[in-house]
Structures are given as structure tokens and as C-alpha cells.
Image (spheres, helix red, strand yellow):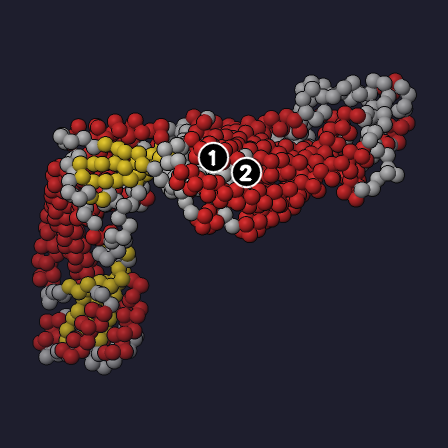
């Protein structure tokens, strides 16, 4: 709890690492995640550092591993379970891993290229087979299908002899040529128009679509292709046709001159395709064996290479001593972890077999250390809420432990519903029970990851919503009569206040609690269920929730102001207790704390008998500032005098808050100059005695002085304190705080507004959906109720749980960031980022390869 309440105490340390053991020492530190390294070579280019060649080797290995992982994923080969995290390999084993990866890459590349060549050859032979089959009867079929169409003048004999083939054309002396191939179906129309425009009718194009899909060699996707046969006249036209085919990426194949030649080619193609299928199947088997063998070690290699690269990156942050035999590193480390750091260096030196051990030396510094707050899986979500506003300044009070309670509670005040809270708690409990499930943790869905990381926040929000739902006595907009109502209707009849005529002739009747036996006492837990039937239910709940919101807001803000005292005491600024904390608390409590007092006093001092004559708290609170209200009925004797006294105290606290701290620091600066002169006199006269100096320093620490270095010059002290800057800063703080007390108190009314909105939405959903299904009194009513309940469940989850839950979450977040944390929390720190292998990001995991 100490570390969660306030960040760990940090120190700056120097590590002296022997060159032979530096790699192993850094590896041990990476496994433990104890320290954050500082860059001792900020002016050296990244490409000019000592270990850049080793980092390039690691990047080359990462490239090979990425290639292997992509091929393994493409082959749909599962990776083995990743239970253990291998340690970083020693530098002498790096070349072995490099050689294994290069050998695998070469082997896999050769097999993949052979497979691609075989697939390409198979595709070409398949296309050639389709072309021969489809073009067998192009000439005859064209003549039979289009006997009435006008033929080209270059081939008038085609009308007379439809069975004339290429050999008969040669016997007649015609220079007729044929060109056949395949083209994608999407390009055939443009291809046909281009042939007509360029060749001016000296070609005949015949084409037909292939029934099955063929693989596109460029994209690998199945596409529809068209077989075409072009008859052209003359060699010059033939050259133009070939160029057009190249432009449209047509696959051209030789056209046989006779049927015998066609049959021989088809038979040869059939044999070659069978042989290619056999060879391709064996190649794929061998490729799968190579990938399976690689998958057994690829995860180990990925982790080892990632750790090696991180170690060499850290070594580049270190500097060498004069002899170049020792590396010097500067690290931020928690003070409590210094013994662990020493043991890690000893283990690293022992692993490397170094004769001279590495050691650590703590050094003083004036730099602000980073902030380390240790969390677990339960508190990390709440700490992330605080860090989203700003990281704690070093050793500042951390709001996270209080947020664990206040955040889900304020959420539940706005979301209070027993049924909705149960659903939310059950959902969060399921995530908590299966939090070690790898499928739930390692998804790439950012929305799901957000819910899963905040599962404990959702669990507490659900549990607190159950509690506030019991207080509101609200479960899916219905009340639960667990203990029996404290109101009785029978007593109104017994006292003869009501008669049968009154009940029959009046739509609404009022229960009078002053009648004996009507009101037996308050409901044991929460709101009495009879209010769910009352016509003035909304008026009653509005008054209750509005007052409750103001009370919770004042308590929450007062608690934030009180927490600031821990910062003032810890940082030895005790003057802030009297000049900042006390005026702030007096201003808040004298005005708005008094409002809370009046609310409780009205609840306790007035009963149902005199409830009609109770004065309004709001009017009294306004008259308190106007110094009026003598003609109004007071809440209690001496009210006017007390209110005037409280207003005067609140007004007087403003100038104290505005001028107290700047004037005190100005006086402290002048006193320090006087002490500085005294110290120099002591130094000249009595150099052997330091007792007076110690007394002066102790006195300044008690007074809150930050000028502990008495040997510095007076000009340096003047630079550290500027009265104008301090006064301006305090003026802004005073204005912000005084106006913020008013606006922040009003801001807490969102608790009432969102609670009312949630209850009304729930009631509207019940009335418009479930009530319709429940009112059907026919036999089909049960069947109709099933889809109605399904619709009610979907709308409840989507609107009331998700949308309303997100709205309440954001408003609770705002109340903590703005209204609560600004009372004591600056959030200007830098987060401690330790060198830890477990925190290193992996590009393979980001790409979904692991």
C-alpha cells in the first residue's frame, strides 16, 4: 500500500561493467526489469555507435524470421505452445543462430521458387489444353452460327467452303495466319475493339469462355478467362496483332496446323500435366516438412533475437572508460531494489566467467527521478485511469488507491440499477475467471482489449451498481418489496379519513403520515417500494438524488483538499498548511459545507407534522450571500449570526490564500540572504566548527526553505525565487479554486441528472416493450412473449448497459480528473520505464504472426 499511495523512492546509480561480462549483466537486468538506463552518448549518431554492426545482424535475423513466419502462416501450420521464455544467447552462439536461419532461408527459398515454377508450368499447360479443346471447331461453328452475316472481303471463299482449314488456304496461295491464346474476361471487349480499329477489318476474332476458374499468376486469385483465335491476313497485320496481345497481357500458345498434330500435342500435354501434379505434390510435402521443422524453433529464435537486439541497444547507451576495458552506465533504480541489482550484476559476471566483477555505485543528483508505482492486475486498471490524466510527480500522493473505491461508487450512483448491475458483474466475473485464457488475452480487437484490461473496474462498477440499485430499490425499473412497505392504506379507512366514495370518485389520493398507523417507519434498506406506485415519485426522487449529489460532491472535494496536506508535509513545505490548505478548507466548508449541514439539519429536525412549513434551503443559502433573510422563518435559532460569521471567514480566507504564500516566500528569501552572510562570516572566522551551520540548515528545513545550499550565491537564490511569478501563479490558483468550488459543486449534480436519465430510460423501455408482451391474455401471448423478451434483452444490453454505462463512465472520469484530482494532484511526472524483456514490443505480434 505504501508504494501505491506514493511512488517508490528512486536513486541514480552508476554501473561499472567489464567488457567481457557487460552482455550477460545487461541480460540479467533485462530479465528482472529493475532499472531504467540513461543515454550517456546523446550527441553520437545512432549509426556511429559501437554495437551498430551487431544490431544490424539482429535486424537481418528479424527479416529472415519474418519471412519464415509469413510462410508458416501461409501454410497454416500451428506454432507450438509458448510456455517458457528462453534466455538471451551468448555472443558466441549468435553466429550459430545466424547460420541456421540463413540455411533455412536458402532452402525454403529454393523450394518455394521450384514450387512457383512448377505451378506456373502447370498453369500454362492447363491453359494450352483449354485452348486446344475450345479452338478445335472455331471455324466450323462460326460459319454455322453466322451464315447471314457479311464476311470480310479478304476471305470471300469462307461463305462457300466452311470446312477449309489452314492447309487448304495454303494450297490456294492465301497468306493467312492464326494466333491463339487466353485473355482475362474483363479485357475481351476492349481487346476486340482495339483489333478492329488497328487492323481495319483484316482480322477475324473468335472467342469462347473457359468453364472453370484459372489462377491469376500475378495475384494468385481465381479468375475467369477467355480463349480466342485470331485469323489475320499478311505478316504486317500479324505483327500488329502480336503487339496488341502483348499490351493486353494475353497468354499466347502455338496453333497446330492439322488435326493429327493437335491430337499429338493434346496427348503430350496430358502426360506432362500428370507428371507435374506428381512432382508438385512431392514438392509441397517437402516444403511442409521444412516449415514444420522451422516452426519448432521459430518462437525461440524470435525471443532470442529480440533480447539480443535490446541488449546491444542498451550497450550503445553506455560509455567507455579511458582504458576501453570497462563500460559505464547510469540507471534510475528503486532504492529498495539496489540489493537485487547487485545480485544481478554478480550473476552476470559469474555467467560470463569474468575475473573482475561488475559493481554498482549510487551517485547524488539534482535531476527529478521518474515515478514508479508498483501495481498488480487488480490495481493496474485504476492506475491507468489516473495516468491518463497525468503521471504522478515524483513522490506525490497517488489518487489511484482512493479511486478504487470512489470511481466505481460514483459510477454506480449514476447507473444504480440492481438488474443492470448483476448483468455487468456477471460479465466481468466471466472475464476474471478466464483471464488466463490465451485467446481472450491475445486478440487484435482493440475494443475487446479495452474491456478485458478493465475487467476488475467493470466488476467493481457492477457490484457497486447492485448496492445503489438496492438503495434506489430499482431493478429493471421495478421495485422489490423485500421487507414490506412502511405505509398502510388500511389506517386511512380506520381513521375514517377515506371512504368508499372517495376511492371511487378520485383518481389520486394522498396518504397522510400524520394519521396514526399510516406510516410505521422507514424502509430498512433504500427507498420504500410504495413510491414506485406514487404519482409524485419523480418529485420525491429528484429531491432525494439532488441533495445526495451535493453531499457526495462536497465530501469528495473536501477529501481531495485534505489529501494535499500529505504533499505539503512530505515535501517540507509546512507553510502551505497554514497559507494554502487552511484557507482552502475554510472557504469550502464555510460555504458549501454549511449547505450540507443545512440539508442534514432539515432531515433530522423536521418531521411530517411540520413539513408544510419547512423553509427552503436554497432560499436560505442565497440569502446567506446577500446578508438578508430576517423576515423569513429560520431553520434554527441564531442562524443569521452564524451565516454572517461563516461568510466573513470565507471572504477573509481569499486574501490569505492570495497573498500569504508569495509574501512568506519573499520574506524567506531576504532571511536566507542574511543567513548566507552570517555563514560566510562563520566560515572566515571559525572554519573548524560546523555546528552553527547545521543549526541554520535544520531551522530552514523546519520552516520549509528549499535553499539548503548555503554556499551558493545570492544571485542564484534570486533566480530560484521571483516574487512576480509566484504572485501571478498564486493569483491564478486562487481564482481557479474559488470559482471552481462553485462550478465543481454544480458539476456533481450530474450524479442526479444521469441517475434520473437512466431510471427513466429503463422505465420507458419496460413500458414500451415488455409491458406490451405481458398484456396479451390469449394463448399466443406466450409465443409472442419470446421475441418481445429477446428485443427487450437486446435493447437493454445495447442502450442501458453499453451506451448508458459508457456515459456514466465518462462522467465519473471527469469528476475524478477535474473536481477531485485538481485539489491536490499535479500529474507532471515522468513514468518509470524499466529495461525489461517482457515489456519489449514485437513487430511480429503487432502483425499477427505470433
Do callouts 2 and 1 mark residues in contact (Cβ within 8 Å)?
no
User: Percent position (x, y) of residue 573?
Assistant: 52, 36
The vertical placement of 506 against 144, above or below, is above
Nearer-the-camera pick, 84 or 336: 336
Q: How far apart are marks 2 and 1 (CA)?
A: 30 Å
Query: Does residue 389 appear left or right of residue 250 in this picture?
Result: right
20 displayed left or right of 513 = left
Mark 1: give few (<14), some (14-19) or many (20+) Cα within 10 Å.
Answer: some
- The quarter of the picture where residue 795 lies is top right
**What residue is rendered at 21% in x and 28% in y?**
347
Which residue is drawn at the image coordinates 74% and 21% (left, top)?
522
Q: Is residue 192 above or below residue 450?
A: below
Q: Residue 103 appears in which quarter of the rendering? A: top left
Residue 495 shows in this picture: yes
Residue 723 screen position, x and y as percent: 54, 50
Viewer-proximal residue among 518 and 187: 518
For the point 26% across and 29% down, the residue is: 342
Horizontal and vertical percent position of residue 688? 36, 33
Residue 561 shown left or right of residue 368 in the figure: right
Instruction: Find numbered disc 1 in the image and state the secondary structure of the residue it sits on.
Output: helix
Give the residue number, with chain letter if any, for mark 1.
696
User: Who's the residue at 35% across and 35% down the image?
Assistant: 11
x and y percent of residue 815 in the render? 58, 39
User: In this picture, is 744 found above or below 142?
Assistant: above
351 and 369: which one is in front?
Answer: 369
Q: Name the residue under label 2.
A: 824
Identify the mark nearer the N-term, 2 or 1: 1
Category of crowding for the residue at label 2, using alpha-carbon neighbours closer than 10 angstroms: few (below 14), some (14–19), many (at least 20): many
Q: Which of 344 and 442 is in front in this view?
A: 344
Q: Helix or strand or loop: what does disc 2 sit on? A: loop
Determine the image quadrant of residue 331. top left
Amino acid at each position: 500500500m505504501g508504494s501505491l499511495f506514493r511512488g517508490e523512492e528512486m536513486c541514480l546509480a552508476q554501473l561499472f561493467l567489464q567488457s567481457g561480462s557487460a552482455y550477460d549483466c545487461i541480460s540479467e537486468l533485462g530479465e528482472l526489469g529493475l532499472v531504467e538506463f540513461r543515454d550517456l552518448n546523446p550527441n553520437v549518431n545512432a549509426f556511429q555507435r559501437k554495437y551498430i554492426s551487431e544490431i544490424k545482424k539482429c535486424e537481418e535475423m528479424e527479416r529472415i524470421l519474418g519471412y519464415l513466419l509469413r510462410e508458416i502462416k501461409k501454410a497454416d501450420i500451428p506454432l507450438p505452445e509458448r510456455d517458457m521464455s528462453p534466455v538471451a544467447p551468448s555472443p558466441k552462439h549468435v553466429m550459430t543462430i545466424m547460420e541456421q536461419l540463413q540455411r533455412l532461408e536458402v532452402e525454403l527459398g529454393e523450394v518455394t521458387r521450384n514450387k512457383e515454377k512448377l505451378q506456373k508450368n502447370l498453369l500454362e499447360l492447363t491453359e494450352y489444353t483449354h485452348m486446344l479443346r475450345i479452338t478445335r471447331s472455331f471455324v466450323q461453328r462460326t460459319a454455322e452460327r453466322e451464315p447471314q452475316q457479311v464476311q470480310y472481303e479478304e476471305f470471300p471463299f469462307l461463305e462457300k467452303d466452311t470446312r477449309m482449314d489452314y492447309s487448304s488456304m495454303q494450297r490456294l496461295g492465301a497468306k493467312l495466319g492464326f494466333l491463339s491464346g487466353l485473355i482475362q474476361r474483363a479485357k475481351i471487349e476492349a481487346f476486340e475493339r482495339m483489333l478492329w480499329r488497328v487492323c481495319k477489318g483484316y482480322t477475324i476474332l473468335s472467342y469462347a469462355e473457359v468453364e472453370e476458374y484459372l489462377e491469376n499468376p500475378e495475384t494468385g486469385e481465381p479468375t475467369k478467362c477467355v480463349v480466342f483465335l485470331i485469323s489475320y491476313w499478311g505478316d504486317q497485320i500479324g505483327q500488329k496483332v502480336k503487339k496488341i496481345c502483348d499490351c493486353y497481357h494475353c497468354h499466347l500458345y502455338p496453333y497446330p496446323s492439322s488435326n493429327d498434330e493437335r491430337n499429338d500435342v493434346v496427348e503430350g500435354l496430358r502426360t506432362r500435366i500428370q507428371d507435374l501434379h506428381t512432382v508438385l505434390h512431392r514438392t509441397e510435402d517437402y516444403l511442409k516438412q521444412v516449415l514444420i521443422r522451422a516452426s519448432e524453433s521459430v518462437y525461440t529464435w524470435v525471443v532470442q533475437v529480440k533480447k539480443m537486439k535490446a541488449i546491444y541497444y542498451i550497450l550503445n547507451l553506455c560509455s567507455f572508460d579511458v582504458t576501453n576495458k570497462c563500460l559505464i552506465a547510469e540507471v534510475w533504480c528503486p532504492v529498495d531494489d539496489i540489493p537485487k541489482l547487485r545480485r544481478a550484476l554478480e550473476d552476470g559476471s559469474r555467467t560470463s566467467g569474468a575475473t573482475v566483477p561488475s559493481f554498482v555505485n549510487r551517485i547524488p543528483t539534482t535531476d527529478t527521478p521518474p515515478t514508479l508505482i508498483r501495481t498488480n492486475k487488480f490495481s493496474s486498471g485504476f492506475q491507468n485511469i489516473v495516468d491518463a490524466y497525468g503521471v504522478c510527480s515524483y513522490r506525490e500522493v497517488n489518487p489511484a488507491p482512493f479511486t478504487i473505491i470512489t470511481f466505481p461508487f460514483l459510477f454506480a450512483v449514476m447507473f444504480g440499477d440492481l438488474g443492470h448491475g448483476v448483468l455487468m458483474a456477471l460479465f466481468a466475473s466471466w472475464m476474471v475467471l478466464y483471464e488466463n485464457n490465451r485467446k481472450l488475452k491475445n486478440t487484435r480487437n482493440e475494443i475487446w482489449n479495452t474491456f478485458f484490461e478493465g475487467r476488475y473496474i467493470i466488476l467493481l462498477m457492477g457490484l457497486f451498481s447492485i448496492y445503489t440499485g438496492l438503495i434506489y430499490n430499482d431493478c429493471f425499473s421495478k421495485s422489490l418489496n423485500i421487507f414490506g412497505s412502511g405505509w398502510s392504506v388500511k389506517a386511512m379507512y380506520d381513521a375514517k379519513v377515506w371512504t368508499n366514495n372517495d376511492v371511487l370518485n378520485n383518481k389520486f389520493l394522498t396518504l397522510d403520515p400524520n394519521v396514526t398507523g399510516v406510516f410505521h417507519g422507514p424502509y430498512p434498506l433504500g427507498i420504500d417500494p410504495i413510491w414506485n406506485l406514487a404519482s409524485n415519485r419523480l418529485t420525491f426522487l429528484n429531491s432525494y438524488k439532488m441533495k445526495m449529489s451535493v453531499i457526495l460532491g462536497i465530501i469528495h472535494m473536501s477529501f481531495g483538499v485534505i489529501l494535499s496536506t500529505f504533499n505539503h508535509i512530505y515535501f517540507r513545505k509546512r507553510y502551505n498548511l497554514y497559507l494554502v490548505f487552511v484557507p482552502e478548507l475554510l472557504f469550502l466548508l464555510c460555504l458549501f459545507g454549511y449547505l450540507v449541514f443545512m440539508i442534514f439539519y432539515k432531515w433530522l429536525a423536521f418531521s411530517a407534522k411540520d413539513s408544510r412549513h419547512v423553509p427552503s434551503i436554497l432560499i436560505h443559502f442565497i440569502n446567506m450571500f446577500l446578508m438578508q433573510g430576517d423576515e423569513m422563518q429560520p431553520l434554527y435559532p441564531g442562524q443569521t449570526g452564524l451565516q454572517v460569521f461563516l461568510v466573513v471567514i470565507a471572504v477573509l480566507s481569499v486574501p490569505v490564500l492570495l497573498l500569504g504564500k508569495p509574501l512568506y516566500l519573499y520574506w524567506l528569501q531576504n532571511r536566507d540572504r542574511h543567513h548566507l552572510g552570517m555563514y560566510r562570516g562563520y566560515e572566515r572566522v571559525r572554519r573548524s566548527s560546523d555546528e552553527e551551520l547545521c543549526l541554520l540548515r535544520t531551522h530552514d528545513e523546519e520552516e520549509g526553505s528549499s535553499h539548503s545550499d548555503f554556499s551558493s550565491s545570492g544571485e542564484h537564490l534570486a533566480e530560484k525565487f521571483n516574487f512576480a511569478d509566484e504572485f501571478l501563479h498564486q493569483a491564478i490558483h486562487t481564482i481557479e479554486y474559488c470559482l471552481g468550488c462553485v462550478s465543481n459543486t454544480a458539476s456533481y449534480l450530474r450524479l442526479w441528472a444521469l441517475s434520473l436519465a437512466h431510471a427513466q430510460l429503463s422505465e420507458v423501455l419496460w413500458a414500451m416493450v415488455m409491458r406490451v408482451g405481458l398484456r396479451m391474455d390469449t394463448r399466443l401471448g406466450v409465443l409472442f412473449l419470446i421475441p418481445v423478451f429477446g428485443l427487450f434483452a437486446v435493447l437493454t444490453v445495447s442502450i442501458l448497459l453499453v451506451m448508458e454505462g459508457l456515459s456514466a463512465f465518462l462522467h465519473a472520469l471527469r469528476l475524478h480528473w477535474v473536481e477531485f484530482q485538481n485539489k491536490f494532484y499535479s500529474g507532471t511526472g515522468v513514468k518509470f520505464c524499466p529495461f525489461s524483456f517482457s515489456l519489449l514490443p514485437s513487430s511480429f505480434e503487432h502483425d499477427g504472426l505470433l
